[in-house]
């Protein structure tokens, strides 16, 4: 039956969430306004800039182009789901160490897009990294250090976890101490 | 940049979706991957009062090589699934080549094969490819099923022969002929942008390496994808060398009247169309000969 509101159940960063939502509410606004997960950044809101990218069942998706009702039954990962307590994800650690961010606005989307890439390709070339992040605009144009950050993180993650990871295996691996 | 309110349902079967379309008619819109429709809704250029989400229809998601050697893809199949399918790569590498030029990885994760074909943007890759390969669309409606050739499906900008109460359920690409090759090339302002012009070519050769069959289609030069050539026997029995292809491409581009916009004027698009057709046919010919 068609309806303007609907009750949905989904997993967000591993936690179960149930909510009644308006059909027109985007997944981005649901995460930001209803769940207070403001790490998902909104800029263009029509699928051009890629800054609102999250992972839905392990695959990157623009959360401004998905309605929250469509995420019913899905597992959503946002940037808030990357760290384990105080321990940053190797990608976050590497972005920090290698100046992979300037203003930081595109960083959540860059991190999640890179995580998706490293889930299927443990040793990407620079070109493959560039293709993977091509859908996310960085207005600081800091792409050189973003590519470098992903390369360094990939190296750390290979050392820590030499078997291929599934995109769902978040937080596995880590920076060798 | 928020969509206006709408009523929503996510049917689990094609029949249920068709019933909803029949009930709500022109007020309703099908939501597939949403990578074109949702931007239009967010910008309030589209204001459907009912949105029928077909993402939960499992029977629309498949990639199958049929007994006759053709490739059947369920309309709800994600573009990324087709891009990474071994069956598609084996028999229809040109489809992979075209898909890799559709938006970005994140777009292809959500975008569907059928959604792009039915949305009918004349600069989009898949409609142009479907015209070049002479694909067939399967449609379901209140009065049952029918099929229509891609070459007869496109009417104008964002307009097809698919009726408001019908749903595209499958696209079928013919079996690749022995000793055939294909190529999909486009020029765009940036990686992932809509094509200014796209060219899709398919060439079949005989055992001596002479062309026996060809087709070249263009995107971005008219209100619909266009089957540009061949016009007659100009490629038949020939080795497709540079001079032959240059003449043919000039001939195919001569009658074009492409649109002018801020990105490029019509004259430039005509010039690019001729060059891209030549390159695409040359590459398709080379691949066909290599496979011979």
Image: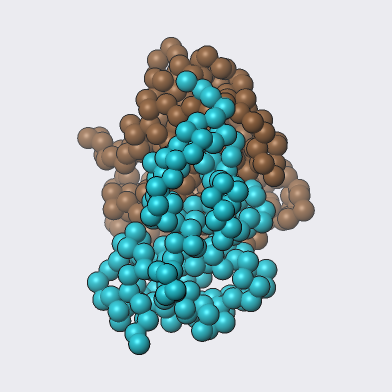
Chain colours: A cyan, B brown
- Whether residue B21 is visible, yes or no, is yes
**Vertical side of B195 occupied by B154: above or below:** above
**Vertical side of A175 occupied by B238: above or below:** above
- For the point 54% across and 63% down, which residue is it? A109
**Vertical side of B256 occupied by B273: above or below:** below
**Vertical side of A58 occupied by B70: above or below:** above
Q: Residue furthest top?
A: B143
Residue B29, percent from left and from top: 56, 28
Residue B248, percent from left and from top: 56, 50
Numbered disc total? 0
Residue B286, percent from left and from top: 40, 60
Q: Residue furthest left?
A: B67
- Whether residue B277 is visible, yes or no, is no
- For the point 57% across and 43% down, which residue is it? A26
Residue B62, percent from left and from top: 32, 39
Q: Is residue B200 left or right of residue B146?
A: right
The N terminus of chain B: image quadrant: top right
Q: Residue furthest bottom?
A: A177
A51 and B76: which is toward the camera: A51
Q: Residue furthest front?
A: A85
Q: Is residue B143 left or right of residue B127?
A: left
- For the point 54% across and 30% down, which residue is it? A5
A60 and B231: which is toward the camera: A60
A26 and A135: which is toward the camera: A26
Q: Quadrant of residue B138?
A: top left
- For the point 30% across and 66% down, which residue is it? A165
B66 and A14: which is toward the camera: A14
The C terminus of chain B: image quadrant: bottom left
């Amino acid at each position: 039956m068609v309806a303007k509101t609907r009750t949905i159940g989904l997993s967000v960063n591993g936690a179960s969430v149930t909510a009644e939502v308006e059909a027109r509410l985007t997944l981005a606004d649901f995460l930001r306004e209803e769940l207070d997960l403001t790490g998902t950044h909104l800029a263009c809101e029509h699928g051009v800039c890629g800054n609102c990218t999250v992972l839905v069942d392990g695959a990157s998706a623009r959360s401004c182009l998905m309605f929250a009702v469509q995420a019913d039954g899905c597992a959503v990962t946002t940037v808030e789901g990357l760290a384990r307590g105080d321990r940053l994800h190797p990608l976050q650690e590497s972005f920090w160490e290698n100046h992979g961010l300037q203003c930081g606005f595109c960083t959540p989307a860059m991190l999640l897009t890179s995580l998706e890439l490293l889930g299927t390709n443990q040793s990407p070339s620079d070109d493959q990294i560039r293709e993977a992040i091509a859908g996310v605009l960085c207005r600081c144009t800091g792409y050189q250090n973003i590519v470098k950050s992903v390369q360094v993180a990939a190296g750390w993650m290979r050392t820590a976890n030499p078997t291929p990871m599934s995109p769902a295996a978040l937080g596995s691996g880590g920076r060798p101490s | 940049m928020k969509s206006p309110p709408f009523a929503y349902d996510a049917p689990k079967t094609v029949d249920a979706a068709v019933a909803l379309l029949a009930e709500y008619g022109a007020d309703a819109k099908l939501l597939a991957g949403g990578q074109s429709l949702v931007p239009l809704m967010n910008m309030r250029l589209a204001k459907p009062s009912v949105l029928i989400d077909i993402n939960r229809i499992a029977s629309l998601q498949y990639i199958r090589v049929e007994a006759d050697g053709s490739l059947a893809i369920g309309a709800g199949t994600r573009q990324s699934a087709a891009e990474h399918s071994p069956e598609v790569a084996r028999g229809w590498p040109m489809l992979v080549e075209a898909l890799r030029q559709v938006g970005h990885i994140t777009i292809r994760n959500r975008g569907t094969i059928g959604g792009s074909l039915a949305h009918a943007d004349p600069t989009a890759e898949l409609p142009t490819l479907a015209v070049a390969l002479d694909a067939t669309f399967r449609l379901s409606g209140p009065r049952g099923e029918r099929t229509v050739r891609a070459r007869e499906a496109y009417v104008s900008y964002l307009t097809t022969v698919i009726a408001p109460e019908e749903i595209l359920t499958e696209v079928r690409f013919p079996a690749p002929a022995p000793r055939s090759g294909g190529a999909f090339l486009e020029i765009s302002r940036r990686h992932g942008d809509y094509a200014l012009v796209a060219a899709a070519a398919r060439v079949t050769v005989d055992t001596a390496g002479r062309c026996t069959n060809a087709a070249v289609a263009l995107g971005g030069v008219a209100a619909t994808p266009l089957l540009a050539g061949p016009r007659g026997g100009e490629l038949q029995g020939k080795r497709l060398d540079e001079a032959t292809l240059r003449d043919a491409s000039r001939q195919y581009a001569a009658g074009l009247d492409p649109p002018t916009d801020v990105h490029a004027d019509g004259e430039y698009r005509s010039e690019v169309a001729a060059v891209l057709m030549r390159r695409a046919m040359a590459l398709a010919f080379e691949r066909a000969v290599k496979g011979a």
